[in-house]
Image (tube, rainbow, N blue to C red):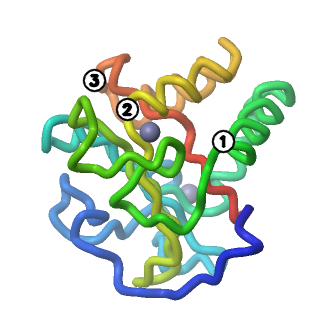
Amino acid sequence: MADSHDLTPQPIPTELHSDYEERPFRICTRCGETLCDFVEGYQIAKVFRRGEVVFEYALCAPCHTGLVDEFSDESRQTLEKFYHENITIGLGSEACAICRCGRADLAEPEFTLGAVCHGTELLESLMICGACAEKSGSFISKKTQEVFGDFINDNFPGVPADALPSPTPITYF
Ligand SMILES: [Zn+2]
Ligand SMILES: [Zn+2]
């Protein structure tokens, strides 16, 4: 799905900085390595609820691949198929990549931002509204939800279970 879209690197917007650290993400949430050192780049996910960031992470390419590898084959295929058929890449972070609803027009002020970055540059970002995230979440198996839930709980103790984002849909790695 990334093939047909030209990537134009731009500075990472403040919105995709770490809210917790109040600066751009510097290290991988999982392994603690410096993100800028990864030639393959890294992924950022942030979940917003009524203007608050309830969850955020940055994952280096190897950690992201490792996480996805732990999903069952069935879940991975189902999810990839769902994203392939439903996601529009290139809309940026202002409209839902699935239903195309603008951020200001969402029924619930709830959405996830996903981004692929390289060094200090943003390569691609997308927004998924809460309703669509819920829908895609129902496509993944219980086992995959557990794998992802374990990852979240290991790295972010205290995150409410209902604030879990879906695994990020951008698969450039
Ligand atoms: Zn890592
Ligand atoms: Zn949507």
Q: Residue at x 27, y 65 (%)?
A: 17
Mark 2 and ligand 2: say if the CB distance to the nearest ligand atom is below 8 Å. yes
* Amino acid type of the residue tagged 1 in the rendering: Leu
**Residue 64 placed where, x, y %?**
63, 52
Q: CA distance from mark 1 to mark 3?
A: 20 Å
Considering only order in the chain, which callout, 2 or 1, is on the residue closer to the N terminus? 1
Secondary structure, mark 1, is: helix
Q: Tell me, yes or no, whether the two marked residues, 1 and 3, touch with CB atoms within 8 Å.
A: no
Q: Which residue is mark 3?
A: 158
Q: Quadrant of ligand 2?
A: top left
**Residue 43 placed where, x, y %?**
52, 60
Q: Residue at x 41, y 87 (%)?
A: 10
Q: Which residue is mark 1?
A: 67
Going by the image, does 127 lie left or right of 22? right
Q: Residue at x 15, y 64 (%)?
A: 22
Q: Which of 142/23 is in front?
A: 142
Considering only order in the chain, which callout, 2 or 3, is on the residue closer to the N terminus? 2
Q: Judge the density around disc 1: few (<14), some (14-19), many (≥20) Cα neighbours within 10 Å.
A: some
Q: Which of 104/130 is in front?
A: 104
Q: Which mark is residue 130?
A: 2
**Residue 91 placed where, x, y %?**
48, 64
Q: Judge the density around disc 2: few (<14), some (14-19), many (≥20) Cα neighbours within 10 Å.
A: many
Q: Tell me, yes or no, whether the two marked residues, 1 and 2, touch with CB atoms within 8 Å.
A: no
